[in-house]
Amino acid sequence: MKYIVPCLLCLLLVSNCGQSDFAQRKAIDPANIDASVSPGDDFYQFANGTWLKKNPVPDDYSRYGSFEELREKNLKDLRTVMENAAKNENPVKGSNIQKIGDFYSSGMNTGKIEQNSLTPIKPYLDRIEAINSLNDIQNMIALLHKMNITPLFDFFAEQDFKNSEMNIGWFYQGGLGLPDRDYYTDTSPQSDEIRKEYKTHLQRMFQLLGDSEELAKANAETVMKIETRLAKSSMTLVEQRNPKLIYNPMSLQDFQRMAVQYNWVGYLNQMGVNPYGILNIAQPKFFKEISVMVRQIPVNDWKTYLRWNLVNETAAYLSADFENANFDFYGKFLSGTLELQPRWKRVLNTTSQSLGEAVGQIYVEKYFPSEAKNRALDLVYNLQHAYAERIKNLDWMSDVTKEKALEKLDAFRVKIGYPEKWLDYSDLIINRDSYVNNILNANAFEVQRTLKKINKPVDITEWYMSPQTVNAYYNPGVNEIVFPAAILQPPFFNFKADDPVNYGAIGAVIGHEMTHGFDDQGRQYDKNGNLNDWWTKADEEKFNERTKLVIEQADNYTVLDTFKINGKLTLGENIADLGGLTIAYAALQIAMQENPAKPEIDGFTPEQRFYLSWAQVWRTNIRRENQLLRLKTDVHSPAKYRTNGPVSNFPEFHKAFNVSEGQKLYRNIDEIAKIW
Ligand SMILES: [Zn+2]
């Protein structure tokens, strides 16, 4: 876990499919448009309607759009890399190629996986079975945490919010099998049904572990009871967006006094972390509750809960009976996906996640042209320049706050493509014996690497996404914006397209990341990444007044039946979309003064191409189940509203498409949300 803002899409449930050849395509293809819809009523549908009709969600997806198309292209690229590595009979032992080849091969060897069945995790199941004291329970929790299996809570290295040059140990709420605490507390019929289905799933998994039907049913109740208690003392997602609420630094002694019945000293010792540094307890109430729970809940119930955690986090990599049961609940029921992805894609994605930078290194050598980096840097510079002009001209901000904002903008660190130094995987052992053990080894390697950072200075060269990730992020603690190689491709970034198209896509994405430094969360950090108020009281009030309108606008969008967007949950992303598009448009105007764009391509003006390009990035078909899941858990608004929401606030958009009063995307000047 890392406190960054992963910007474009929440990667909760990644999936892929479909085929495409981006290079052959028109940057903006009129064939994708649905001319029966007026752009002033539903710009998203106008821009993408025909594409949406022609590209229904494939069976092995829960949603399908531009991101998935691009991920699909990356999968094809990476498949060659993986298959060649797997075929290599004499790789240098311990080399990255050997590890990639063995990892991928172990995942593709279904004969062995079926034959092994539960054997690879049997030693851990046996250890849980042998537990007979509270002390044993706590030791087992630490042992599982070392493999990134996380019952009860999470522990990781993260910057000290008020001393951004140092990493400290963070304790964070966790331990739930459903996607969020609200799933346990919400009283709607829909949530009732999900809990009922979840209990059936728990029972099925316990039966697969060998429990009788009756025992499995009882065990499901036990897990549900423990998780419900954890959920009730957990912060909501909206609360967690407030950095001040989750920053509660204290010494180990104070933590131990606060949550007295859990042995935190023992825990840190087992994790190999020096116990003398400052710790951050993100949710004190949650950890107090854990401390009470460990005494109140019988050891046998904890054993049941630990068995569930172990099997839940390994099921996707075990034999088909476990994998299918896991998919039936999380993939089918919760997300609406109809079938599992082809095996090679699943294994490829897992390999790519477990060996992120080893795979990334080969990926950029083969597929990332160096000119992409330079052109992206030029764009960033132009956006930064346009942003500075906007800040200087803001009519609502005082000169003192403007000066600080400009300093922060100037201090942005920019990372493009791939890290300047690669992670060293020498200490990680990967072989062809067991897929799930390879995953657990890679997890353990990553946990060790992370925990070593605690009480040490922050390494500002580190990346928190691999180069092959189609996404981008803003990291408030370092005040940096980061764009992995994989997103610098069409439809985001297109060498062959003209400026309006690129500014409407990657330009707006860069502007989006920059705006995270000035959204309701990011604005609380200074240019050095410290949580430190640099706003005057009056400016803060004016900012909050403006964000209220953004919240209201989002709250008013009904997405499905009666289900609406949560304006507070999505506030940061909505501010970033609004700001990103504003800045990109301003930067485009500057760029076009030097390099005038063609007045018309396929009948579209430069301004129209800019907005169409933005809409194209968001074209997405999504299944109902996934949409409902995301309305509860995703900090991003649904794709349609990421398109229509921001553009409805731009008089420039209204002008470009002749949007007039009475149309749905028209707003009077006093209804327009404008922050940056
Ligand atoms: Zn974002």
Image: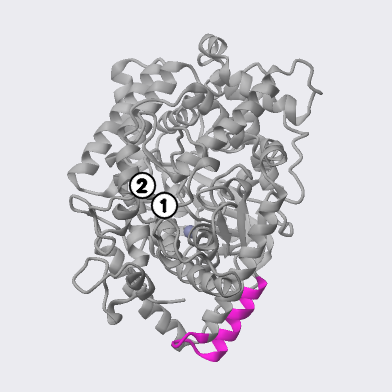
Q: Where is residue 5 in the image (x, y as percent from the top left)?
A: 52, 57
Residue closer to the observer: 52 or 106: 52
Label 2 crowd bin: few (<14), some (14–19), many (20+), radius 10 Å:
some
Q: Is residue 529 left or right of 98 when viewed as pictured?
A: left
Residue closer to the observer: 302 or 368: 368
Amino acid at dot 2: Asn
2 or 1: mark nearer the eye: 2
Residue at mark 1: C-beta within 8 A of ligand 1: no
Q: Where is residue 87 in the image (x, y as percent from the top left)?
A: 69, 17
What is the number of the mark on residue 616?
Answer: 1
Q: Dot 2: what SS?
A: helix
Label 1 crowd bin: few (<14), some (14–19), many (20+), radius 10 Å:
many
> Which stretch did the figure color magenta?
393-411
Amino acid at dot 1: Gln
Tell me where residue 405 sits by quadrant: bottom right
Which of marks 1 and 2 precedes in the sequence? 2
What is the number of the mark on residue 32?
Answer: 2
Q: Dot 1: what SS?
A: helix
Residue 307 vs 27, above or below: the answer is above
